[in-house]
Amino acid sequence: MRFMERQHTTHSAEQTCELGRRCGEELRPGDLITLEGPLGAGKTTFTQGIARALGLASDVVSPTFVLIIEHAGRIPLLHLDAYRLENLCHDAVRDAGVLDFLDREDAVKLVEWPQRIADFLPVPRLRVVIAPGPGADERNITITRQ
Ligand code: ADP
Ligand code: MG
């Protein structure tokens, strides 16, 4: 995975998906990966690439109306959207299922909007930050290990 830990620039959704796929090839059960970037940055697109690498049967959509989606695959993918979890105490985060999510060692765990639950996320984790621009279809994607 070290070879991926740098800044990448993509120029289309397909390239971002492909980067996600290459990243996904390196993931193992229990790995935690966080995805940051504004709405429309390409978080779901990147996740679709990961899903492809994990051999997922179903398409990935953002879990905007449910908190956590589980996808079956060669390695299961757990997809948590923490967008609506701002300023929650430990009990509320537990009740939302986040702690059980983090305990899962059989799946790749992916968190969108990790800033919302930063205090509860363990290390090590793989951090992906997607910054749009300056071109319309350009995305600067930084992958680091935390
Ligand atoms: P998010 O999940 O971060 O809100 P999505 O992945 O759902 O974002 O949407 C990204 C949108 O931006 C899509 O409509 C996609 O076609 C478009 N797009 C254009 N260029 C890129 C790129 N280089 N990488 C990812 N998406 C891109
Ligand atoms: Mg999305």
Image (spheres, grey):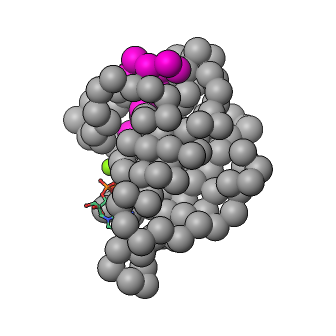
Left or right side of 65 for 100: right
Residue 8 sits in which quadrant? bottom right
Residue 50: x percent and y percent?
A: 48, 39
Residue 130: x percent and y percent?
A: 49, 63
For this rendering, which residue is in front, 109 or 51? 51
Left or right side of 49 for 107: right
Give the answer, above or below, for where 133 lies relative to 71: below
Residue 80: x percent and y percent?
A: 42, 34
For this rendering, which residue is in front, 12 or 132? 12
Left or right side of 18 for 3: right
Residue lying at 69% horizontally and 63% vertically, measured from the top left:
6
Residue lying at 42% horizontally and 72% vertically, measured from the top left:
11
Residue lying at 30% horizontally and 41% vertically, measured from the top left:
62
For this rendering, which residue is in front, 91 or 126? 126
Give the magenta-colored segment's residue range.
70-81
**Residue 43 visible at all:** no
Q: Which residue ends up furthest to the bottom in the rendered image?
A: 134
Give the answer, above or below, for where 34 lies relative to 130: above
Magenta stretch holds residue 77:
yes
How many numbered tags mark residues here?
A: 0
Residue lying at 58% horizontally and 45% vertically, measured from the top left:
23
Give the answer, above or below, for where 65 lies relative to 132: above
